[in-house]
Image (cartoon, rainbow, N blue to C red):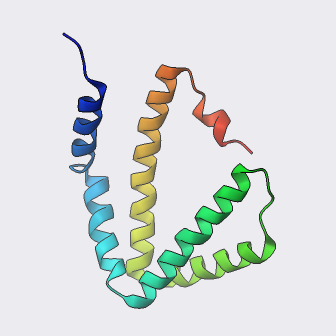
Amino acid sequence: MAVNVYDTANLLASQLKETEEYREYHRLKELAYEDGTNKALLDELKRMQFKMQARAASGEKPDGEDMQKLMRISSLLQLNQDASAYLVAEFRFQKLIADIYKILGDVAGIDIDALTQA
């Protein structure tokens, strides 16, 4: 019997939505994004993180101004209970996804830890 890996991936995706990590992440995201200020800060934080990751991936050093802006935004968000709880839940869910990616990488012979070292 042939296994369709796409069906398996879809099953995994639906099972991920049933995890406590996902449910808490989703609940807290909705709560944090209800506030317009939180939404604006969280969206800017995500843009800044993406920008810095893209720079790092291309071998560029982080821009000092961007680092300071990221730190200011992070500090503001940590002061807000809803935003802070959401960011912690997001980290927990991302950790779960990273663990799954590591399992898949091991099967493929990809050393995920080596890819993340600077």
Q: Residue at x 29, y 64 (%)?
A: 26
- Pick the quarter of the image with the C terminus: top right
In this rendering, would 115 be left or right of 1?
Answer: right
- Pick the quarter of the image with the N terminus: top left
Give residue 90's position: percent from left, percent from top.
42, 61
Q: Residue at x 60, y 65 (%)?
A: 49
Please state the total of marks drawn on the protein image.
0
Q: Residue at x 46, y 36 (%)?
A: 101
The answer to whether one can see residue 80 in this image is: no
Residue 56 versus residue 76: which sits nearer the camera?
Answer: 56
Give residue 93's position: percent from left, percent from top.
39, 53
Q: Is residue 4 above or below residue 32?
A: above
Give residue 55's position: percent from left, percent from top.
72, 58
Q: Is residue 56 above or below residue 28?
A: above
Give residue 29's position: percent from left, percent from top.
34, 71
The answer to whether one can see residue 41 in this image is: yes
Q: In which image quadrant can residue 74 be found?
A: bottom right
In this rendering, would 75 be left or right of 36?
Answer: right
Find the residue positioned furthest to the top: 1
